[in-house]
């Protein structure tokens, strides 16, 4: 019988977590089970995920920012079908495909005129890796300066410059010609640049971990220092690009003129991995500077037709549906509505963000009982409080969100840019309720503890079962 994907999915939907426990990442499965995030979503459309009972979940995570256009956008789906129907030659490699040329042309129409050349790859981390190589090749220098708290990906170059979380633990050694400065520390930047060995100053205009960004002219001054000292400015727009912050690119909020930008995530509307490095022609040509170096930096799948098709359709959707304008308007509304909750919830320290990249930070409340609860939770685990907000948001209100980084009292929302007042209303109300629940200490913490304990007992039971020769449970 020929392969039938629909029957396969129909027959085995629901085995998701067991399959992953057995064949992929059981540690992730355990985390999802403890937190109650082990839902089986069977369908997705726009801003919503659906389970097998047809219950809708509001997706304010957007796959970490890949679904700016919403999930399963019909225009992008149709474009994929059309690309398949055309039976185009794909990845001939020793040719120049039409679709990659068209997507490069379309992307460059959305970037400032000094950026004239595009390199396509498959992910955000690969775009950052490439940007580091381009900067080194163009300047003949080796050092990269990044920001504390930054996140640029998890392959060796990008992980070496990343300055947040425990992502590096156990994986060293890394690129050693890296320095990290505090966001806003111009003096430290100048001290480093003056040595004349810095190839690039690399930063996310709005940091993904924690949603931090300068509220002054730090970036403009940093850019001007970079120009003085011959250092390239590299903006990592992997998460902030494609309209996320209410402009095409986040660097536009500070009127910057970066030498290189990196793009990925929503570039393909969430369908096919796709990344890009966009840079000045002079920089590009310093990489591909001789005939024998024509493919000195390349990636087999880099310009594949489906990724390019999705990219073309995604840009079209952003433009035609005015999603960037919507991101700015809905972002402003959300920020205002969430900030208004501050007077009711002393737990909220700050609501910050640009466009639809928003963080809500919590702090120790003044009320005695709550203060005590806060301190106990932080003794147990520094990242626990934010978990206590996102868990009921999902379990009680069916809203998917995330904590903003390791050991932070911050949650982050990245809604798709298609949201309307309806989703804003729903989220604000759900968040209000979830915070009310957090005040009923120790209720939420007990819920999390009970899940953890149940998982431990379960695991022990299974381990003992296998030790005694029983087959692990299979469906
Ligand atoms: C700013 C930034 N750069 C790079 C990356 C890495 O992208 P990817 O996960 O596609 O490798 C991410 C991913 O979250 C990101 O937010």
Image: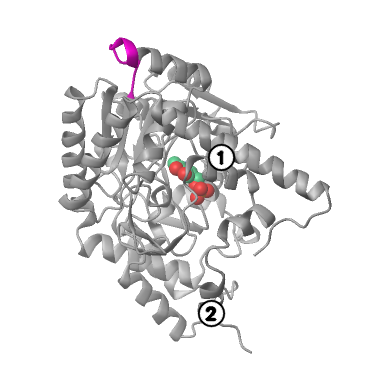
Q: 170 or 182, which is in the foreground? A: 170
**Element class at badge 1:** helix
Pointer 2 local density, CA inside 10 Å: few below 14, some 14–19, many at least 20: few
- Magenta residues (range): 362-370
Tell me if the residue at label 1 has its CB under 8 Å from ligand 1: yes
Q: 327 or 290, which is in the foreground? A: 327
Q: In this view, does 295 lie to the left or right of 447?
A: right
Q: Residue 7 carries which label?
A: 2
374 in magenta: no
Q: In this view, does 412 lie above or below 279?
A: above
- From the image, tell me which residue sits under label 1: 158
Q: Position of residue 325 (x, y in %)?
A: 18, 51
Q: 256 or 323, which is in the foreground? A: 323
Q: Distance between the residues labelled 1 and 2?
A: 40 Å
Which residue is depicted at the point 25% across and 47% down?
247
Q: 403 or 250, which is in the foreground? A: 403
Which residue is depicted at the point 47% across and 27% down?
383
């Amino acid at each position: 019988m020929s392969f039938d994907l629909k029957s396969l999915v129909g027959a085995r939907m629901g085995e998701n977590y067991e399959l992953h426990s057995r064949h992929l990442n059981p540690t992730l499965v355990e985390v999802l089970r403890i937190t109650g995030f082990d839902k089986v979503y069977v369908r997705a459309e726009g801003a919503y995920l659906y389970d097998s009972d047809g219950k809708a979940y509001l997706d304010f995570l957007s796959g970490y920012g890949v679904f700016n256009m919403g999930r399963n956008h019909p225009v992008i789906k149709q474009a994929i079908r059309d690309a398949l129907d055309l039976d185009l030659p794909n990845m001939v490699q020793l040719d120049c495909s039409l679709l990659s040329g068209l997507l490069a042309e379309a992307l460059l129409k959305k970037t400032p005129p000094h950026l004239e050349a595009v390199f396509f790859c498959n992910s955000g981390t690969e775009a950052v890796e490439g940007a580091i190589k381009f900067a080194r090749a163009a300047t003949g220098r080796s050092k990269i300066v990044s920001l504390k708290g930054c996140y640029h990906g998890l392959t060796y170059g990008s992980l070496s410059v990343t300055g947040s979380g425990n992502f590096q633990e156990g994986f060293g050694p890394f690129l050693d010609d890296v320095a990290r400065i505090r966001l806003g520390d111009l003096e430290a930047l100048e001290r480093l640049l003056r040595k004349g060995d810095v190839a690039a100053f690399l930063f996310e205009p709005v940091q993904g971990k924690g949603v931090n960004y300068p509220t002054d002219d730090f970036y403009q001054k940093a850019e001007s220092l970079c120009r003085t000292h011959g250092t390239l400015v590299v903006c990592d727009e992997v998460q902030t690009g494609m309209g996320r912050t209410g402009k095409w690119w986040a660097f536009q909020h500070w009127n910057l003129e970066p030498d290189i930008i990196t793009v990925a995530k929503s570039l393909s509307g969430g369908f096919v991995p796709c990344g890009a490095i966009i840079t000045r022609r002079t920089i590009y040509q310093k990489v591909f500077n001789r005939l024998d170096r024509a493919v000195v930096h390349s990636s087999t799948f880099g310009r594949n037709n489906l990724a390019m098709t999705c990219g073309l359709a995604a840009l079209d959707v952003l433009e035609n549906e005015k999603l960037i304008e919507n991101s700015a308007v809905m972002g402003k509304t959300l920020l205002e509505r969430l900030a208004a909750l501050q007077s009711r919830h002393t737990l909220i320290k700050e609501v910050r963000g640009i466009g639809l990249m928003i963080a809500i930070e919590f702090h120790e409340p003044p009320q005695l009982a709550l203060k005590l609860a806060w301190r106990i939770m932080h003794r147990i685990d520094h990242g626990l409080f934010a978990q206590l907000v996102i868990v009921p948001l999902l379990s009680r209100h069916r809203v998917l969100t995330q904590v903003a980084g390791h050991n932070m009292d911050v949650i982050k929302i990245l809604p798709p840019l298609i949201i309307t007042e309806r989703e804003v209303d729903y989220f604000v109300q759900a968040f209000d309720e979830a915070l009310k629940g957090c005040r009923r200490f120790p209720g939420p913490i007990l819920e999390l503890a009970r899940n953890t304990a149940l998982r431990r007992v379960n695991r022990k039971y299974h381990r003992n079962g296998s030790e005694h020769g029983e087959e692990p449970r299979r469906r």
